[in-house]
Image (tube, rainbow, N blue to C red):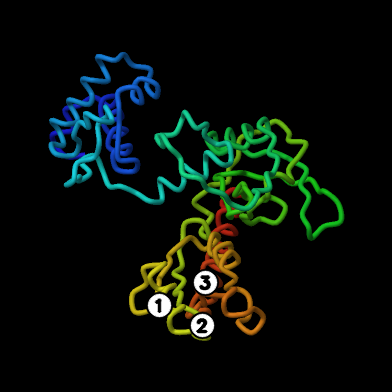
Amino acid sequence: MDADHSRLSWSVQRRLRFIELRLYWEGRINRAALMEFFGISQPQASQDIARYNEVAPGNLAYDKVAKTYVAGADFKPAFGDISADAYLAQLRSIETGGLAAGESWIGRAPAFAGPPRLRRHYDPDLLRQLIRCIHGRLQLATSYLSFSDEAPSVRTIAPHALGFDGQRWHVRAFCLRTSSFRDFVIGRLSQVDEPVRTSVSPEWDLEWTEQVTLKLGVNPELSAPMRQAIERDYLMRQGRLNVTTSICSSYYLESQLNLDIQTSDLPPKRLQLVLLNRPEVLARRAEVQEAAAALIAQASQNLVN
């Protein structure tokens, strides 16, 4: 928002932003849309449209035939950048049930489809306990099923964050049994005990706070036109894309992009990107893991003393 917009209340800014998004994405806006979405009166809707016209002159015009306001020929956003990601995220939220159609600023959603999304069950009471631990610096005992074990085992964990790997939600927590920070799949937690105070500090989790850069390139086995298309898709510069993320998230990114699979094991079309600096990434991970283990050992010794 620029200085002129700062004089407007948050509620007014929100309605003017709504007008702008409808004009940009759908090319039109009317008072009924404002009245229905925000539950305001017709005079208030008219006032909002007039105010938007004052703030962003030329962005809308009244179409007497259609009896609606339409985007001006020289439309320029006045209330923040226009994001294609935000629009597509709204569509996806409508599809998955995260948003009802009336709760989205999208008025006329285009026909769209995607593969069925397999929903995982998360116990809201359990999630509430985890969030309580994160905010209150608490730890709890829980039964957890790790795929490396034959049966569930009791773990005492001190959660400090939530994580999403693209498919599943995890809780990032210190495991007192292994004296290390790990990602616990929320759906595999059960029989949670009452939380108690913990002496574990989130600052010990260096794999969460420290970062690594993955240098990505297009699979050289693809044809030249395909390589160029992928470079445009990711806005690469000179065929390269640097992605910086936390150490713990880098494993999930590598898995999502199939970067952990040998190029000879998949056809080039299935493995469009390759990791160009694997030795550097592995060295960085090892460095942080070693530093984290030393920090945890020192911190634990101090607590004992």
Q: Nearer the viewer, residue 142 or 90?
A: 90
Q: Is 273 drawn above or below residue 82 in the view shown? A: below
Q: Nearer the viewer, residue 171 or 84?
A: 84
* Amino acid on which disc 2 is placed: Leu
The residue under label 2 is 222
- N-term mark: 1 or 3: 1
The numbered dot on residue 150 is: none
The residue under label 3 is 287
Q: Position of residue 174 (x, y in %)?
A: 62, 50
The residue under label 1 is 228
Q: 104 left or right of 184?
A: left
Q: Nearer the viewer, residue 157 or 2?
A: 2
Q: 2 left or right of 197?
A: left
- Which quadrant of the rendered structure holds the N terminus? top left
Local secondary structure at mark 2: loop
Q: 279 left or right of 64?
A: right
Asked where in the image residue 95 lies, by quadrant, the reply is top right
Measure the C-alpha gap from mark 2 to mark 3: 34 Å
* Amino acid on which disc 1 is placed: Gln
Residue pictured at 23% horizontal, 24% vertical: 48
Q: Is 178 drawn above or below residue 54 in the view shown? A: below
- N-term mark: 2 or 3: 2
Measure the C-alpha gap from mark 1 to mark 3: 35 Å
